[in-house]
Amino acid sequence: MLTPDYNEKVFINCPFDDGYRPILHAMVYAVYRCGFYPVTALAEDDGTDSRLNKILRCIRDCRYGIHDISCIEVNMNNLPRFNMPFETGLFFAAKHFGGGLQKTKSGLVFERTKYLYQQYISDLNGIDTKAHGNDPIQVLEKIRDWLRTSSNKTTIPGGATLRRDYRDFVTRLPSVVDKLGFDQDNILFSDFCQIVERAMHEKLEISLLTSACE
């Protein structure tokens, strides 16, 4: 696994449900393909540590944060989910109250439909949220544009290249997962990250080989 520093880490705050997996995978791929490193509380598994402590460490250690506040539907007990808005608030607070590197934080706030958040988190009025419409490609493009603007990195690929590479990755993913002996319907976050890292490494090797042959 890679060992990035604060300026390369992107905290991902989103649901981890099976139904959300295509969006999460698109987020992880986009972050890696743009030259950054995704971080979530799923990367740690310590039964002696609380989930909140893990989240706080993730937020502290990451300059960037992706927050999807779209999944607030009520459950069978007619109660909404507030985990994602809560973690978004923690990220905002770290930037506002923190010192040094914490002041440099930059966040991307996703929702499903533009401005729907105004009906349930009016305190966010004035924030330029991005709507993804449950479309992984929209997620890719918006993360790409945000990281390009926020980081000013010139090595970030264009949107067309990113879309093409991701579709190729998704096509090859089932065979890769099967070859490695993973359960495609229950793959660990860390395992998926390793697969994406390997895909990035192979793409770099091919690119260097092609350049050497020209």
Image (cartoon, rainbow, N blue to C red):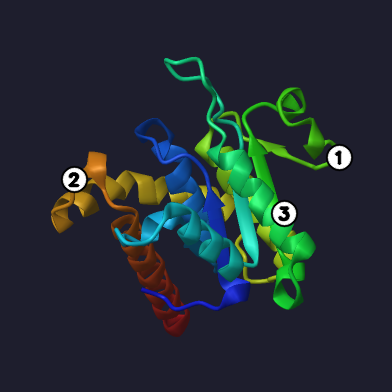
Per the rendering, the mark at residue 92 is 3
Q: Which residue is mark 2?
A: 183
- Residue density around tag 3, few if under 14, some if 14–19, many if 20 or more, within 10 Å: some
Per the rendering, the mark at residue 176 is none
Seen in the picture, residue 158 relative to 85 is either above or below; the reply is below
Query: Residue 30 placed where, x, y %?
Result: 52, 55
**SS under mark 2:** loop
Nearest-to-viewer mark from 1 and 3: 3
- Mark-to-mark CA distance, 3 and 2: 36 Å
**SS under mark 1:** loop
Count numbered badges in the picture.
3
**SS under mark 3:** helix
Query: Residue 102 placed where, x, y %?
Result: 71, 70
Tell which residue pokes out farthest to the bottom in this image. 212
Per the rendering, the mark at residue 126 is 1
Seen in the picture, residue 124 relative to 9 is either above or below; the reply is above
